[in-house]
Amino acid sequence: MKKYVLVGTGHRGIQTYIRPILEEYQDCAEIAAVCDINGKRARFVSTYLGHEIPAYTDFDQMMKDHKPDVVIVTTKDCFHEEYIVKALEYGCDVITEKPMTTTAEMCASILEAEKRTGHKVTVTFNYRFMPIFAQIKEFVASGKLGDVLSVHFEWILDTTHGAAYFRRWHSQRKNSGSLVVHKSTHHFDLINWILDDIPVKVNAFGSRRFYGHTREERGANCRTCAYKDSCEFYYDLAKDEQGFYKGLYIDCEDEDGYIRDRCLFSDDIDIEDSLSVNVQYGKGTSMSYSLTTHSPYEGWRMVFNGVNGRLEVTAFENVVVDKQEIFRFYDRDGRCVDYDLRNVKRRVGGHGGSDTSLRDNLFRGYTSDPLGQMADTRAGALSIGVGIAANKSMAEGRSVCLSEFLGDYFPELKK
Ligand SMILES: NC(=O)c1ccc[n+]([C@@H]2O[C@H](COP(=O)([O-])OP(=O)(O)OC[C@H]3O[C@@H](n4cnc5c(N)ncnc54)[C@H](O)[C@@H]3O)[C@@H](O)[C@H]2O)c1
């Protein structure tokens, strides 16, 4: 039985870790205490889940009182590093949410602390556990494509999911590192993992022309807005099942001033809503990647151009189409093979069941991991590395090598 504590009792912390530990992993995991900068939010955990869990606002006090084996970090991104490093120094292993952190300096600090303390950090890349991505990983590893020469990867968010990032703390670069770090860390990790390669050089462009100050009919937040009856983006935070959002956010506002239904057209928003990134990989593959946050539908498309053929995988959500997923291989003899994904084993749970598979590995342990789905700080660093390099590229108008800030930790980036 391992003893866990968690810092950052927001949506992800409660629904993905605390609740499942209490309800599904009682035989192997104990959640001893929780901590949040917002004491009301930390105490809400017990009220909401109906289990008395000690709640702290002082992380050090929690660590001294409970002496856990593992610390789970689910705070706002920019604070991951502070708690990861402290937890390692307390002699604990760490499970941290993505992105591992948001800046080159904090990334270096985590890598250095892990090496110095000898304890282990796991970065929870749940997307690796989505059956369709595991399928792509297996296909590329099978050699059917031959060497992968280039990748095209487009990630598409609609105006519900995409807009959600612009209402919350994510909309400010200082909190999230912008979406090219916060969101794209998932996507860069997938490609790094599927190609089994390292990203070495990045060039990026980005803009914000859909959200942010693009209209005059705007307010501070949806609940108080004069345009709530006419705005197509009006969002009712209070309207949710069992008062979760009300209890977790609205009732806690007075303690930290965090407003979760802020206006999408606010002046404070300083992240991009359209991104275009080129990445050069160590073995020679090049990738063109884009992130769109304002599409009429959700989905993604990954294309691998190999020496022996071309793999095109497309997924659609929130739109009526003939097929939600297409997994198609074109060979060099003019054949096109569609793989039937209906029989792929899928699990119930968040993010296409991937959260469930991830948790089994985290809490029950795993003896074999043939696809390498569990991720460490190397994966955490090399995926945010692309985002950090992209931010630098946009700011400085040049191509940026990851060796500029990660070369001391991963010498292969310098070759
Ligand atoms: N893997 C995934 O698919 C996935 C999905 C959602 C969120 N996440 C990650 O989970 C983390 C939490 O996201 P969320 O959606 O739960 O956000 P949230 O806003 O609901 O929760 C964040 C919590 O962190 C707390 N916090 C902020 N600063 C703190 C500090 N200095 N010390 C302690 N606590 C602090 C806030 O009070 C809040 O309770 C983020 O890093 C996010 O990237 C990952």
Image: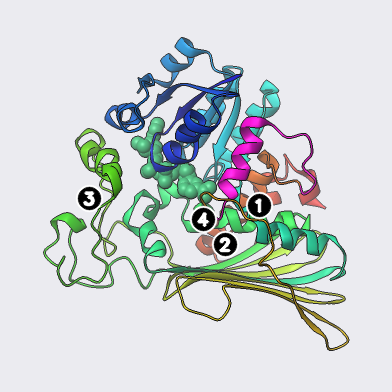
Residue at 23 percent across and 40 percent down: it is: 257
Query: Residue 291 or 10: which is nearer the viewer?
Result: 10
Within 10 Å of the Cα at label 1, are there few (<14), some (14-19), or many (20+) other Cα atoms?
Answer: many
In the image, residue 377 sits, relative to residue 65, either above or below, namely below
In the image, residue 397 sits, relative to residue 42, either above or below, namely below
Q: In this view, does 12 lie to the left or right of 103?
A: left
Within 10 Å of the Cα at label 2, are there few (<14), some (14-19), or many (20+) other Cα atoms?
Answer: many
The label number, if any, that marks residue 128 in the structure image: 1
Q: Is residue 262 left or right of residue 380?
A: left
The label number, if any, that marks residue 183 in the structure image: 4
Report how far apart the C-alphas of labels 1 and 4 lie in the structure: 14 Å
Within 10 Å of the Cα at label 4, are there few (<14), some (14-19), or many (20+) other Cα atoms?
Answer: many
Query: Residue 225 or 246: which is nearer the viewer?
Result: 246
Of the numbered discs 3 and 2, the one sitting upstream in the chain is 3
Disc 2 marks which amino acid?
Ser
Task: State which quadrant residue 271 falls in.
Answer: bottom left
Q: Please identify the residue farthest to the front as the structure is shown.
A: 343
**Label 2 SS:** helix
Of the numbered discs 1 and 4, the one sitting upstream in the chain is 1
In the image, residue 9 sits, relative to residue 221, either above or below, namely above
- Can you see residue 332? yes
Report how far apart the C-alphas of labels 2 and 1 lie in the structure: 27 Å
The label number, if any, that marks residue 238 in the structure image: 3
Disc 3 marks which amino acid?
Ala
